[in-house]
């Protein structure tokens, strides 16, 4: 590398990426998606209870893929979580355990029920909920355990299911990052009493906005329906304990837009293709990052298929890289033209929304995981030349901080 090219862009040197181009091509664009939406708009049909049939078609397809009895589409993953908590009968006196490393919408709906939230530390290797800390936090007061399959990496389900059975708690799987991810050849979303998925524009199954809830229990499905819809669809509520709410539901309208369902139906058949392309690119990126001192690629345990592989988080070692801070390394990489950022929001126990007066929680693994990772684009359709530029930029910046 020439001397001028060695100089960091943040100090006036030449950028590694000098051209203005799209680094991250998502969500996918296709003629088939446009055609599918157009066909729906031209030929809209209602089902037997006066609801858009395309919603029913999507729900049937989704539950069939996951081998669950019931599927409910909603306008977001957040709404799906809100409905899931109501479905399980969450009350003010109940306690919910949730991971601290996750997007905040995994836990914000709990606050609407005024229930107590107990945050769990993470596995330092992948950011998922720590089984060891879970064993310390769970008690007879716990009613619901929420887990997030972070970045598409399934949680340690064998151990988690043992804990769930021992303490007889409800389990909600947040699969928002993990479409078609597998734990020991079993799809995530098939373990919990309820599983929820997000389908916003950045997710593997991207509909612009959308969410879905799946379960095997009729009571949970119908209770979730009451808190997500009103109108004709509530005519399907037939459990005696719920009939008094058939006219009004709970007053919320969180149902999915039929255009989102049309997009989702089209994209379901493409998920495996997207996953194959994404894994090919990210496996290549990981192999190259292993050769850069001070960086480590995301860790995956044996027996795991990441599926969606949502969010590519790289570890950086401050002890090797001149004690550089997360903020500084991000600024330096951005100056080189790389689109990098922090890995999501801060750990939830540090966010003002969740803080309780006089109760300070220290979850050291979660704080370290957040502060020692950076997020790169989740390359799927991008050419190898684009990924090579990122590798070049990472090497350039790390070589500089290594010498300090």
Image (cartoon, rainbow, N blue to C red):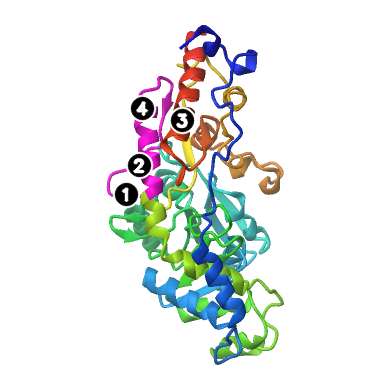
- Circle 3 SS class: strand
Q: Secondary structure at mark 4?
A: loop
Comparing labels 3 and 4, the label whose residue is closer to the camera = 4
Q: Is residue 361 left or right of residue 166?
A: right
For residue 290, the mark is 4
Q: Secondary structure at mark 1?
A: strand
Q: Are marks 1 and 2 in contact (CB under 8 Å)?
A: yes
Q: CA distance from mark 4 to mark 2?
A: 14 Å
Alpha carbon distance from label 3 to label 4: 11 Å
Q: Is residue 400 above or below residue 266?
A: above
> Circle 1 sits on which residue?
304
Q: CA distance from mark 1 to mark 4?
A: 20 Å
* Highlighted range, magenta: 277-305
| N-term-proximal mark, 1 vs 4 | 4
Which one is earlier in the sequence, the residue at label 3 or at label 4?
4
Graded by Cα atoms within 10 Å as few (under 14), some (14 to 19) or many (20 or more), the crowding at tag 1 reads: some
The residue under the point 51% across, 14% down is: 401
Rendered image: mark on residue 77: none
Crowdedness of circle 4 by 10 Å Cα count: few (<14), some, many (20+)? few
Mark 1–mark 3 Cα distance, whole angstroms, equals 20 Å
Is 295 contained in the magenta span?
yes
Mark 1 or mark 3: name the one nearer the start of the chain. 1
- At 54% from the left and 47% from the top, the residue drawn is 102
């Amino acid at each position: 590398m020439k001397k001028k090219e060695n100089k960091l862009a943040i100090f006036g040197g030449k950028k590694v990426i000098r051209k203005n181009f799209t680094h991250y091509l998502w969500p996918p664009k296709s003629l088939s998606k446009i055609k599918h939406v157009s066909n729906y708009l031209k030929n809209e049909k209602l089902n037997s209870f006066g609801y858009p049939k395309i919603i029913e078609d999507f729900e049937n397809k989704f539950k069939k893929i996951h081998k669950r009895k019931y599927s409910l589409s909603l306008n977001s993953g957040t709404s799906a979580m809100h409905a899931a908590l109501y479905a399980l009968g969450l009350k003010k006196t109940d306690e919910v355990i949730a991971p601290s490393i996750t997007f905040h919408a995994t836990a914000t709906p709990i606050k609407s029920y005024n229930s107590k939230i107990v945050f769990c530390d993470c596995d330092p290797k992948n950011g998922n909920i720590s089984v060891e800390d879970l064993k310390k936090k769970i008690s007879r007061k716990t009613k619901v355990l929420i887990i997030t399959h972070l970045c598409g990496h399934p949680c340690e389900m064998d151990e988690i299911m043992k804990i769930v059975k021992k303490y007889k708690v409800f389990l909600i799987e947040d699969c928002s990052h993990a479409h078609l991810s597998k734990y020991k050849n079993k799809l995530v979303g098939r373990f919990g009493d309820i599983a929820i998925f997000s389908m916003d524009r950045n997710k593997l199954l991207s509909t612009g906005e959308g969410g879905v809830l799946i379960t095997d229990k009729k009571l949970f499905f119908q209770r979730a329906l009451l808190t997500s819809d009103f109108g004709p669809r509530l005519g399907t509520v037939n459990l005696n304990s719920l009939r008094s709410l058939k006219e009004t539901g709970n007053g919320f309208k969180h149902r999915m837009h039929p255009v989102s369902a049309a997009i989702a139906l089209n994209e379901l058949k493409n998920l495996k293709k997207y996953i194959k392309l994404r894994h090919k690119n990210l496996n290549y990126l990981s192999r190259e990052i292993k050769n850069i001192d001070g960086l480590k690629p995301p860790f995956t345990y044996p027996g795991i298929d990441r599926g969606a592989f949502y969010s590519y988080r790289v570890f950086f070692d401050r002890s090797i890289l001149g004690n550089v801070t997360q903020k500084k390394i991000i600024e330096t990489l951005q100056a080189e033209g790389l689109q990098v950022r922090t890995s999501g929001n801060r750990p939830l126990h540090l966010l003002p929304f969740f803080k309780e007066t006089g109760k300070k929680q220290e979850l050291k693994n979660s704080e370290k995981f957040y502060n020692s990772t950076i997020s790169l684009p989740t390359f799927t359709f991008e050419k190898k030349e684009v990924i090579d530029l990122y590798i070049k930029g990472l090497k350039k910046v790390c070589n500089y901080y290594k010498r300090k």
